[in-house]
Image: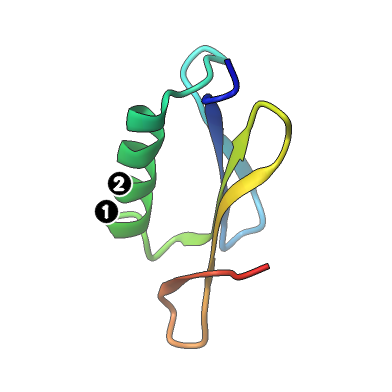
């Protein structure tokens, strides 16, 4: 039940977007695919921050743009 996630993207403009289709939660496979697409796809230069949040509102993945302009994992 708790292996479902939402992917939250923050763009350079400060606008936040939840990557969900019709408000549906993503499975582990769908979340991994979404993170791969967002972090390594053509729009990666526009993304400032990416988070994967589970059903309990816990952040399970967090990447932020570093000084080089690339997304890097954030450690707690």
- For residue 57, the mark is none
Asked where in the image residue 5 lies, by quadrant, the reply is top right
Check disc 2 and report the residue beneath it. 37
| Quarter of the rendering occupied by the N terminus | top right
The correct choice, above or below, for 36 with respect to 48 in the image is above
C-alpha gap between disc 2 and disc 1? 5 Å
- For residue 41, the mark is 1
* Number of numbered tags placed on the structure image: 2
The correct choice, above or below, for 61 with respect to 45 in the image is above
Q: Nearer the viewer, residue 67 or 28?
A: 28
Q: Are marks 2 and 1 in contact (CB under 8 Å)?
A: yes
**In the image, residue 53 lies at what x, y percent?**
62, 39
Q: Which class describes the residues within 10 Å of circle 1: few (<14), some (14-19), or many (20+)?
A: few
**In the image, residue 37 lies at what x, y percent?**
30, 46
Asked where in the image residue 23 lies, by quadrant, the reply is top right
Report the residue at 46% width, 72% height from top. Answer: 72
């Amino acid at each position: 039940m708790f292996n479902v996630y939402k992917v939250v993207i923050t763009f350079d403009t400060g606008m936040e977007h939840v990557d969900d289709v019709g408000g549906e939660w993503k499975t582990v496979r769908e979340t991994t695919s979404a993170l791969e697409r967002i972090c390594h796809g053509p729009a990666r230069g526009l993304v400032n921050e990416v988070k994967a949040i589970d059903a309990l509102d816990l952040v399970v993945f967090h990447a932020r743009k570093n000084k080089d302009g690339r997304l890097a994992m954030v450690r707690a």
